[in-house]
Amino acid sequence: MKEKLLEINNLTVHYVVENEVVQAVNNVSITLNRGETLGLVGETGAGKTTLALSILRLLPDPPGRIADGEIIFNGKDLLKCSDKEMRKIRGEKISMIFQDPMTSLNPVLTVGEQISEMIRLHRKVSRTESTRLAVEALESVGIPGERYLEYPHQFSGGMKQRVVIAIALACNPELLIADEPTTALDVTIQAQVLNLMMNLKKEKNTSLILITHDLGVVAETCDKVAIVYAGEIVEYGTLEHIFNNPSHPYTVGLFGCIPNLYQDVKRLKPIPGMMPNPTDLPVGCNFFERCSSRMDCCKEKKPATIEVEPGHLVKCFMAGEELTGR
Amino acid sequence: MSVLLEVQNLKKYFNTPKGVLHAVDGVSFKLERGKTLGIVGESGCGKSTLGRTIIHLLDSTEGKILFEGKDITHPTKKELKILRREMQMIFQDPYSSLNPRMTVERIIAEPLLIYKQYDSKEETYKRVRELMDIVGISPRFADSYPHELDGGRRQRVGIARALALEPKLIVCDEPVSALDVSIQAQILNLMQDLQEEFGLTYIFITHDMSVVKHISDNILVMYMGIPFEFAESKELFKKHYHPYTKALLSAVPIPSIKYKKKPILIKGEISSPINPQPGCRFALRCPYKQDVCLQQDNPLVELSPNHFVSCARAREVNDV
Amino acid sequence: MKSEDTKKRSYSMWKDVWKRLKRNKTAMFGLFLLILVILGAIFAGVIAPEGYDAQNLRERFMKPCASHIFGTDQYGRDIFARVLYGARISLRVGFSAVLLSVTVGTVIGACAAYYGKYIDNILMRFIDIWMSLPSILLAISVMAALGSSINNLVIAIAISSIPGHARIVRSAVLSVKNQEFIEAAISNGASDFRIITRYILPNCLAPIIVQATMSVAKAILSASSLSFIGLGVQQPVPEWGAMLSAGRTYIRDYPWIITFPGLAIMITIYGINLFGDGLRDALDPRLKN
């Protein structure tokens, strides 16, 4: 059952812009098993999207550059694949859903054609067969097959995102990467789309990497969670680890920032300051400036990753001890 | 507490090629001084239009707006200029709400210069520094341009600009939804502090239920231009009578694994209220729909003290 | 907000544009050519103190040599001096015509876009009619009506290029008009005039400047064409187009008489166009990188 699908080891990605090096992703390691859902949580600019694009090798190059590390998918290092092999993997084995459903569909093709084109690209099937499969794909996301011949502008936002999901899942990929798939949608629509995604995923035993900034969405969908801060994974564990026993000061801080529907708080506890500039990361811990339980040693060197309980990794000197200052 | 703002049966229609769009269709409420009214709803429900109509960025089609007891629905140019200093707005997008060609200092000074608040430049810029201090922007950003600042600081500049003329009412249109959670919390706290310090009254427009619960005293739920439910914040989150409010609240993902809940999934999506038929505008998506819902419009009815609901079947559905 | 360790780097947009422009070698070459022509025009009196109409009938049709590096024409006038003085005329006509048409075009375009509705409709239909007239024909009729003088030449060229500017400004204003900072200005009680001049136009500068730069080249060409057909500047004033026209009878035997004014036109236009292209890239960083 627990078969390893994706393993990322020490991935480091840089952007080189005008003689400055943006350290977008630093030394990130992730493992994902078949059928599992991993939530990548972090703020704007934390490097979540860069990480996802690196897996598909879709980084704009230049300025993006994978400096180090390996991405092993099904036992094969994607960073060593040829462009031709990569094209075969994209869409067929790994597909991606982008944040904005308004711009990720081609406005001059009908939605049906876009799905069937995707199918024909990866499978040797006839035109009629691909049309049949496309209608099936549309129906699987709850859109009546008659709408095959309609254009994207005839669909509402939530419906477009369903079409995007249908395209992404058309070839039964083993891994689906969803980059903020519901951020542009209203809550009631978000609930519909998330529900749909999770059902399809379960049905097809697809693995999912869900990139989001919303801890609420994570709580409802994910098995494992990685908290990303300034290009690093600062905390990694199962849903229970992260939500019941948040151990990195940043994770704790994030929870303090969110107003809760079920609890009354007079004032929120914001994390002071801002994320460090990725062109100029500090020598010590990246979170040092904003941390409420910082110590002297945090300023001088980067903390190592500590396993506080089996499968629960924390990048902090204080890991495993009672956090002070909160 | 005295009433600062009263809105009576306010309507705002737009003429579109497809017909008349009823963006805001009969909203009434009273807002007391120093309180916060939260207006929630999904995109296209008319909440932003309502806010803009109240501060006269748009002209109302019908209804009345009373500010400190005075009818300000159709002000003259002169009255409007006086009125503008009393009501300000904080915008959603900290990127497009600041003039990219002006420095931070200049942006905050603009309202002071427009109203010739001070006789000399020195006094004006002294006040600007004071405002920057109030909202927590360090003076070294005075000569920066907006594109050099991050979202949180930009929003602080927007807040400073809104505060410059010491308004009584501030309409906040999704002021934190473009910000990251850690910055969002900083701005929400700042807004609460300012409210306490200057006795401000807020109209807080948002789609985020958790945020609106946190900051508001009263909440108005809107759907396709119609007010669906109005109650005190605490009351509304305890008891929600309208089927739409129920669905909306249940759909909010909770960042906790202690509360396992199943969202009430409502089918379909919100559409534009163009030439709407009489009857409940939510009926097509409503799990409790019956013929009675489509027969007449449903005004807000006081179901329990200070808790108003616009639903023909609210009593039946909720056993009240 | 204590943890602000990022150093403050405040730079205005113009410094930024200049930095990008400096990196663009072809644009800098264009600027160099343009400056060369401008300097020639400014210091014409110093470089060629004898003036543009000093005739020396003994030295007619001289080939380029040490004393007359561009040679002399049919009246024995030094062509180098005439080309330098001609730069004064061409640049003056080019820049003032553009200034005039950009000003009028901006007012029309900004009003149409800002006030919208029927004002927009009336103004733009008017502009459409204006645009349907061939511009050189329009300029010719204006010149014929007003008589030929440098000022009339400026007016004629300006009139024919106003509609283009009006359209560019209108579309630029439309794209800025709906941004939230305009609403913010309105809710701060700013007047329409203040909003247009302080909020909208400064944010439309980039396309206006690019269009203006390119039209300087067009205006210089139009001025030369009009002079060539005898409707622009009259003899003996050394306008490049007029020089071409006067020299064309001698093209077989004394080709330098028209070669150098022609080259002058070419170099100036080339310089302006290179610079204009670079400016457009520098003002809109999205196009490059």
Image: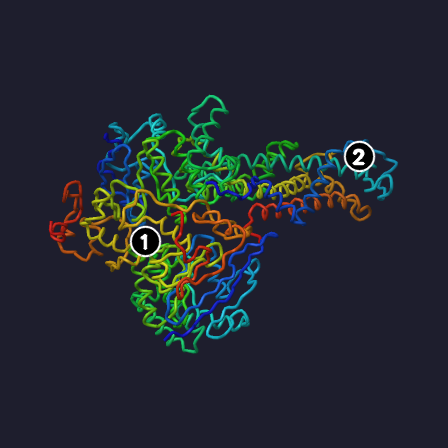
Q: CA distance from mark 2 to mark 1?
A: 73 Å
Tell me the kind of residue under disc 2: Ile
The amino acid type, in three-letter code, at marker 1 is Asp
Is residue B159 visible in this depiction of the protein?
yes
B33 and A295: which is toward the camera: A295
Q: Chain of mark 2?
A: C
The picture places residue A10, in percent across and down from the top left corner, at 52, 64
Q: Secondary structure at mark 2?
A: helix
In the picture of the structure, the residue carrying the numbered disc 1 is A186
Q: Residue at x 35, y 58 (%)?
A: A245
Q: Is residue C138 above or below residue A74?
A: above
Which label sits on residue C47? 2
Task: Please give the chain letter of the residue carrying mark 1.
Answer: A
- Residue B265 in view, yes or no: no
The N terminus of chain A, quarter of image:
bottom left
| Quadrant of the image occupied by residue C65 | top right
